[in-house]
Structure formats: C-alpha cells, structure tokens
Image (cartoon, rainbow, N blue to C red):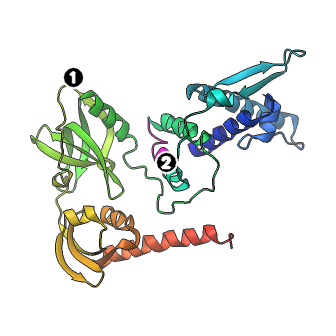
C-alpha cells in the first residue's frame, strides 16, 4: 500500500478512536475505519482467513506507529470477558497545541511529506504529517495540480543532510554537462531547491573551489569520507554564484512587476514592454528553467527560444486539463 494511503488510514484511526464514546474492538475498527479491508459475506473460508490475517498485520503496524508518534493508545479489557479487548485514545492526552494552518498550507505540507516517502526520512515525514493533521479540523482538500511528486535525488538527500549535520565530507559519482562523468569528493554546505530541483552546494576538494551539484545527476550511493567535524560551512553562501553547470543558452523571458526575483537576479534586463519586464536569462538545463517558469504561474512567459516556450505551454495545458477533468463533476 502506498505511504500516502497508510498515512490517511492512520489519520482515520486516530479520529475514530479519539471520538468514540467508548472503546472500539478490532472488529469495530475493521468495519468502520476507512483504509482497512472489511469482512465480506461472499468470501470462501480461505479467502476470509487471508483477509483477516492481512488486517491483523496492518493493525499491529498501525498501533506501533501511533505509539511512536506519541499518541497514547490504551488497551481496554472487558471486565466480564477477559478476551474481549478494545482500544481507545484519550483525546486530552493526545492533543497538541492548536496549529493554525490553512487548507493550502496543509496541502503543501502533504506534498513535502510525500516528496520524502521513498527516502530514508520517509517514515519520519509521514508520522509527523499524520500527527500534525490529527490536531487540525477536517477541511476540504485543496489539489495542487502542478505539485506532482518529485523523486529525483530523494535517496541522496537524506545522506547528504546527515553529512552536513556531521560536518563530514562525502564522495559520489556525478555526471556534469561541463566535465562529464567522474568521482567527486565534496564538503557539503547546503541543500537548496531551484526551479523545482534539488541541489547540493559545497566545496569540491579536488578542484579546491565551491561548486553546485544537481542531485538527480548523482549516481549510486553517497559515501562518507574522513572524520566528522572535519570542516565548517561558511556562514553565508552566495547561491547565485555557485552554478555547477556552465550556462550555454539564453532565454528571453517576460516577467510581471514584482515577480520572478530569482530569475531577475541572474538575468540581464532588456526592456519593458507594456506590463512585462523583459530579461535575457542564461541557462543550461531546459527542464529546470521550464519548471521554474511554470512555478511562477501567469507571472512569467517565454518569448524565445521556441522549444522552451512550447515546453512551458505543453506542461501548463496538461495541468489545466487535469484540473478540468478533476473538477468536471463539481458543477
């Protein structure tokens, strides 16, 4: 079962047990909590046994997850029938301080948790999201049509984040548009997101200078090198100066006033045309620039080159088509 489904089931279980008038038995939980496979009258004895076994394993995992995130799940035994076991959550003990988040902010948090679901931090992210969500009132979900899950770099990021915390160098195989494929030994400083992609900023020991590495171009495992606390990252890192890729192309982009500040900082101003400020933006990765422009919505448009403009239009139209299809039944 996908991690997002497991998180939703766990959230449903928290809500059911917190609001039940009394204890809930396993049978009641299985029959009423969305996410569990309820008993079915038409099943054969063998199929019913397999379904029950699957439910028991799932429920045991969920009980352990509740305890790990600090939800006080209590086991209540019937005074008359000692084998009649039920469960309850004391809402007072389980409550967190109120968290004032809008539906959009909650949706963004869900996207962030889903981003990490295949990585080493996935379980922690999912548990944190479930615990925060359980303390919030239920609200209509807000779809983020352009926030499709990104998987690039998801395996490398946790290892690099740990190395940054430990002050330990790392080694990895990397393919660059400028220098090809090779081994890199890097003192990691920061992880940053630019244009929807994840980058490592750090000092390349072999080259003796600061470099930027796109995580999707890292091959294989991240390998720790040397002792911990071997270096300290600089207090300030000039992100815009650390381009691991040599810009070989230029795009002409129109930006509305007070928008696209990251693009403006690395671009050259050309002119003003009506409500648009026109800039020449150097770039080396068409997909990265496409995603960055899409993230600005209607506040940016590509004037040239045509292949980049077409890529932006195609992805925007696809997102709108998805939004229209999902909203078609709402009237």
Q: Mark 1 vs mark 2: which is more N-terminal?
A: 2
Of the two numbered discs 1 and 2 in the rendering, the one whose residue sits closer to the viewer: 2
Q: Is residue 258 shown above or below 110?
A: below
| Residue closest to the eye, 181 or 95 | 95
- The x, y position of residue 149, in whole percent, is 47, 53
Is the N terminus in the top left, top right, bottom left or bottom right quadrant? Answer: top right
Residue 304 visible at all: no
Label 1 sits on residue: 227
Question: What's the residue at 22%, 66% (across, down)?
Answer: 264
Q: Is residue 64 shown above or below 252?
A: above
Side of 305 relative to 93 (left or right): left
Q: Residue 7 lies in what quarter of the image?
A: top right
- The x, y position of residue 283, in whole percent, is 22, 65
Magenta segment range? 109-120
Label 2 sits on residue: 109
Is the C terminus in the top left, top right, bottom left or bottom right quadrant? Answer: bottom right
Question: What's the residue at 89%, 16% (across, down)?
Answer: 81
Q: Is residue 157 shown above or below 304?
A: above
Side of 112 relative to 299 (left or right): right
Report the residue that reaches farthest toward the left. 208
Question: What's the residue at 30%, 66% (across, down)?
Answer: 260
| Residue closest to the eye, 293 or 304 | 293
Question: What's the residue at 9%, 40% (across, down)?
Answer: 208
| Residue closest to the eye, 178 or 58 | 58
Check disc 1 and report its element: helix, strand or loop. Answer: loop
Q: CA distance from mark 1 to mark 2?
A: 35 Å
- The x, y position of residue 266, in whole percent, is 19, 63
């Amino acid at each position: 079962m996908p991690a997002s489904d497991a998180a939703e089931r766990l959230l449903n279980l928290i809500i059911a047990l917190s609001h039940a008038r009394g204890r809930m038995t396993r049978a009641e939980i299985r029959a009423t909590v969305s996410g569990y496979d309820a008993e079915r009258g038409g099943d054969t004895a063998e199929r019913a046994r397999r379904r029950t076994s699957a439910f028991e394993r799932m429920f045991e995992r969920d009980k352990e997850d509740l305890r790990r995130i600090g939800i006080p799940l209590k086991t209540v035994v019937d005074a008359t029938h000692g084998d009649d076991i039920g469960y309850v959550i004391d809402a007072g003990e389980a409550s967190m301080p109120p968290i004032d988040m809008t539906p959009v902010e909650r949706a963004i948090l869900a996207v962030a948790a889903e981003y990490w679901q295949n990585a080493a931090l996935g379980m922690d992210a999912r548990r944190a999201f479930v615990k925060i969500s359980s303390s919030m009132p239920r609200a209509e979900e807000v779809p983020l049509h352009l926030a499709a899950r990104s998987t690039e770099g998801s395996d490398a990021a946790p290892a690099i984040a740990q190395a940054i915390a430990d002050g330990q160098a790392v080694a990895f195989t990397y393919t660059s548009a400028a220098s090809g494929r090779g081994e890199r030994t890097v003192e990691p400083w920061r992880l940053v997101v630019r244009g929807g992609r994840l980058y490592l900023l750090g000092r390349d020991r072999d080259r003796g200078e600061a470099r930027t590495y796109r995580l999707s171009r890292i091959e294989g495992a991240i390998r720790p090198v040397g002792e911990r606390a071997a270096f300290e990252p600089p207090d300030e890192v000039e992100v815009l100066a650390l381009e691991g890729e040599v810009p070989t192309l230029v795009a002409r982009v129109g930006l509305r006033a007070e928008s696209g500040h990251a693009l403006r900082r690395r671009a050259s101003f050309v002119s003003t045309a009506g409500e648009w400020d026109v800039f020449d933006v150097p770039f080396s990765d068409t997909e990265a620039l496409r995603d960055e422009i899409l993230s600005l919505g209607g506040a940016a448009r590509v004037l040239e080159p045509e292949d980049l403009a077409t890529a932006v239009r195609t992805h925007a139209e696809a997102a709108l088509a998805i939004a229209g299809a999902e909203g078609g039944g709402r009237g």
